[in-house]
Image: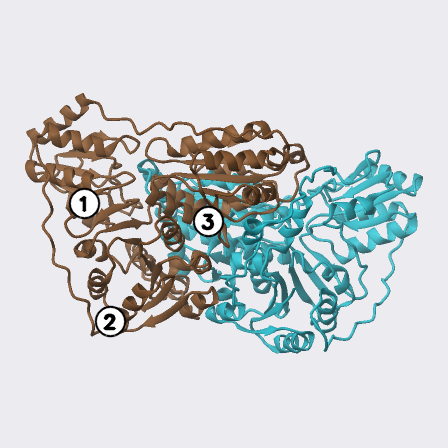
Chain colours: A brown, B cyan
Amino acid sequence: MNGAESLVRTLLASDVKTCFANPGTSEMHFVAALDRIPGMRCILGLTESVVTGAADGFGRMMRDPAVTLLHCGPGLANGLSNLHNARRALAPVVNIVGDQATCHQKMDPPLASDAIGWARGVSAWTRSAATAATVGRDAAAAIQAARSGNGQIATLLAPADTCGDEGGVPAERLAASPPPAVPAHRIREIANVFRSDEHVFLLLGGPLLDERLLGNAKAIASATGAKVMAQAFNGRVERGRGRAPIARMPYSVDQAIAVLAGTCNLVLAGAAIPAAPFAYPGKPGALQPDDAAIHVLARPDQDIGQALAALAEELSVTTSSAAEMSRPEAVTAGGISAEAVTQTLAALMPEHSIIIDESVSFGRPFFNGLSSGPWHDWLQITGGAIGNGFPMATGAAVACPGRRVIALQADGAGVFTVQSLWTQAREKLAVTTVVLSNRKYQILLSELANVGANPGRTALDMLDIGRPDIDWIGLARAFGVEGAKAENMAQFTDLLQTANERSGPFLIELMTA
Amino acid sequence: MNGAESLVRTLLASDVKTCFANPGTSEMHFVAALDRIPGMRCILGLTESVVTGAADGFGRMMRDPAVTLLHCGPGLANGLSNLHNARRALAPVVNIVGDQATCHQKMDPPLASDAIGWARGVSAWTRSAATAATVGRDAAAAIQAARSGNGQIATLLAPADTCGDEGGVPAERLAASPPPAVPAHRIREIANVFRSDEHVFLLLGGPLLDERLLGNAKAIASATGAKVMAQAFNGRVERGRGRAPIARMPYSVDQAIAVLAGTCNLVLAGAAIPAAPFAYPGKPGALQPDDAAIHVLARPDQDIGQALAALAEELSVTTSSAAEMSRPEAVTAGGISAEAVTQTLAALMPEHSIIIDESVSFGRPFFNGLSSGPWHDWLQITGGAIGNGFPMATGAAVACPGRRVIALQADGAGVFTVQSLWTQAREKLAVTTVVLSNRKYQILLSELANVGANPGRTALDMLDIGRPDIDWIGLARAFGVEGAKAENMAQFTDLLQTANERSGPFLIELMTA
C-alpha cells in the first residue's frame, strides 16, 4: 500500500467522505488511490477558491470536515481567502496540499513555494508529511485537529513521495477534544452580573447559533431585562417561524454604537469584543461605551451552548416558544426594492432552506425580514473576503441534499468565484442564486463617503463594474446553469417559484438600483 | 497632504504610472487621492488574480513595474499565485496592500489576517508602513526594490491610517541597483571551458532573452561547437524571422535527459540547474549527466546579457544575422491539429505580436514553429501556477498599445482567471485569445500515466472539465468580448484574420481533441 492509499483509507476510517478538489501533478497518487478505494465523494472545482469555499459551506452545515485537495503552494494560495472566511466561521476543514517530493525540494522546481508559510495564516494545525509510513497518522491528526474545539482548519502538506512510496499505514480515527465547558464558578459570576444590573448586553457568537442556544439567550434577556444580540458576522444561525428571532450587531459603526449605548456590562458568549470592521476617522474602534465592563461568559473556543444553558439554569429562567410570526404574501407587482425582495423570499422560501448571505450592501433588511419565513439556516460571509457566497452555497448543497440553498449574492463579490456555477451544474445541486446586480461596488461608494471623499471620475471608474455590464444569465448558461433576469417584483416572484420547482441549480439576475 | 496623496505622488515621481487594482474599504484614501492627482492610469480587475497577473505581463514587457492595489490580506492572497509566476519570471511588480489602521489591528476585525506572512513568500522586499509621514519614502523604497537586479516583487502594506492621516511627504525617485556585471576573471574561466571541451551545453535563462543575448549565445555555440538552449520556462523571449531561433529545454523529463546526454560541461547563463518539474518514480531530479561539471557564467540576478557579450568578445566570435525562414501559408482546410494551428499562427500573426503561452499540453509545437513568424515576443507561464495567461495578456496589452497580443490559452487553466476578459473589454485591449478547448486536464492524464496509474471513473471525473462543457463564446460575451468557435482549420484561419482586424479583444474557441 502506498502512502496515498493509506491517506485515503485514513480519511474514510475517520468518516471524512467528501473531497472538494482541484488536483495537479503532485496529487496524482492521491487521485489514483481514490480510484482503487471506493467511498469518497469527489467534487471538482474549477479554481481553488471554489474548492475551499465549498469546504467552508460543507463544514458549517455538517459541523464536521470535508477534505480539500489542492495543488502545491499556488493552489493553496488561491484558496486562502475562503479559508480565511472559514477560519472566522469556526468551520472545520482539512486541507491536503500536494507538494514537491521531499528529495526534489532542493531543486527549486517551478511550483516550489512557501506553502507552509501560506498555510499557517489560516490553519490552527499545519504539518508537512515526512514519509509514506507516517502520512496516514498525519492525516488522522489533521482530522482530529479540524474537529477539535468548535472547529478549526488543519492543513497537511503531502510531498509526492509520501504519497507515491510504498509502506503506507492507515491510521484509525482519533478522538477530538470537544470545546471545553465553562466552569460553574464562571457561570455564577456571570449570573451575578445579570442579577445586579439592568444594563447588561449579551452578545452571542460562535460556530452555530442554534435553536436551543438562542432560546436560552432570549429567555435570559427576557427574564433579566438584558439586551441580547448576535455579533455582526456569524457562521450559521438557525432561524424562522417559532424560533427565537435574533438581531445582529449592525455593520454601520454609528448604528452599532447606538445599539450598545447605555451598556454597563457587556457579556460575551462566544463573541469577540464588538469592533468596527475598519477604523474610521473620528470614530472609536471598540463599539461599547468606554466605561462598560466586559465579561467573558464563553470564549469562541469554549462550549457556548452549554454555557448559556447553565446560565439559564443558574438564573432559573425557562425558555418558551417564540411567537409565531405570520408568513407574508409574495410581492407580485411594483419595482424592485430590498424590502419587497425580502417579503417575497419570506413568502416563498421552502421549509428548511439554507440561506447564503453575501448580499453586501443591498441586502441589509434580509436577515431580520426573513425571520418570518419557515425554518432555515443562515450562513453569511464571516471574514470579509468576498467571493464566499457562490462556493459556500455549493458546499452547503453537497452537505444537505433535499434542502434548497438560496444564495443572496452581490454581483461584485459573486464574480470572484462565479466558476462555482459549473460545479453546481455538474453535481445538479439544489441551489437558487439571486444575483443582486447593481453593477457597482456600492459598499465602497459608501466607504468612500466615510473617509470624506467625493468621488471623481477615477474613483467612480474603480468602483463601477458596469461598462461593460456583466451578463449574468450568459455567465450561468456558459457554466451549464439555467437562469433568467428579473426587472420587477412580478418577474422575481415568478422566477423564485420556478427555481423552487427545479431539482438543480437556477440563477436569477435581480436588477437592482 | 495625507499619506495616500504622498503615496500617489511618490509613485508618479518614480515614473510608476499604471495601477492595476481591486480596491476595498481600506484603500479608499488611495482611491480618493487618485481622483485629486492626475497622471495614474487605473485599470480595474474583477479579482486579484487578474490584477497581479496583469502586473506580471506589464512588468515583463516594460521591464519596469506597474503598481497593484489590493485589499488587505485576503486580496493579496487571491493574487499570490500570479505573483508566484511573476517572481519566477523576474518581473518587477510593486504591490500596495491596504490593511487595518495600526491602532485598529489589536481589535482583530474580520479582514485582519497574516498579510505580511503571505507577502513574504513571493516578495523580495516586504514592509508595513508605520505612519503617514513615512509611507511616501516606503513606496519609493518599494519601487527601488522592484527595479533592482533583474526585477523583483516588492510589497508594501499600507495601514489605513498611514494613508488617511495628514502629514504625508512625497519621496523622490530612488536609483535602483542594476544587476551586477559578471567579473572579467569569471568570463575568462568560462571561456576556457568552451575552449577546452566540445561537449559544452550553454543553458540560458533570466528575465529577457533578447535579440542581442540570443545572437551572442548562438554565435558562441556555433564557433565552439557547444549546444545552446533556453530553460524550459522563460519570462520573455524575443523571436521571429531574422532573429536567432532558440530551442527550449523540453518539459518531458525523458526528452530533457536525452537533450542533455553527453554534456561534460554545463554552463548556466541566468538559468538554474535544469530540474524535472516534479520528481517522477525512478527518474532523476537533476537532468544533466551525473558526471557533468556545472559552471555558472551568470546567476539569474546578474547581468546575463553583458556576460554573454563579454564571453563572445573573449572568444572572439561575431554574431551574424540568422537565416531568414520563409513564412508559411495559413492552413485553410482539414481538421485541427497543433501543427496546422502553428502554421496558421506563423502565417497570420501580425508583426510585433506578443504571444502569451499558457497552452499547456496542446501547444507543444507552438514555440519552435512560430520562429518562422514575424518578429514577436514570447511570454509563457513560468511558475506553473495556472491561470496566468488571460491576465498576463491583459497586462501586456496595457503595456504595449499598438501591438497585437495573441494568447494561446488552455481551457482548464484559462477558466481560473476568465474574469480578465471583462478588463480586456472595458479597456478595449488588442488581445486575441485562442482557447484550446479540449474539455479536460489533458496534462494530468499524462501525469497520471507517469505515476503508473490507469485512470478509473473517479480519476477521469476529476480530470475532465466537460459535463457540462464550458461555453467559451458565451463566457466571452457575458464579459463583453466578441467570440466565435473554430471546429476546423478553415474556420480557425478565417477567425484569426477577423481577430487581426479588430482593435479590441476577440476570443476564438478552438475545439481540440
Which residue does the numbered mark 1 point to in the structure image?
Answer: A257
Distance from the alpha carbon under mark 2 to that under mark 1: 35 Å
- Provide the chain ID for the residue under circle 3: A
Q: Amino acid at mark 2?
A: Met
Which residue does the numbered mark 2 point to in the structure image?
Answer: A489
Task: From this view, report whether residue B291 is shown above or below residue B250.
Answer: above
Residue A14 is at least partly visible in this image: yes
Which residue does the numbered mark 3 point to in the structure image?
Answer: A51
Distance from the alpha carbon under mark 3 to that under mark 2: 34 Å
**Mark 2 surroundings: few (<14), some (14-19) or many (≥20) residues within 10 A:** many
Task: From this view, report whether residue B320 is shown above or below residue B150.
Answer: below
- Provide the chain ID for the residue under circle 1: A
Contact between marks 3 and 2 (CB within 8 A): the answer is no
Q: Amino acid at mark 3?
A: Val
User: Helix, strand or loop at disc 2?
Assistant: helix
Q: Residue at x 37, y 28 (%)?
A: A176
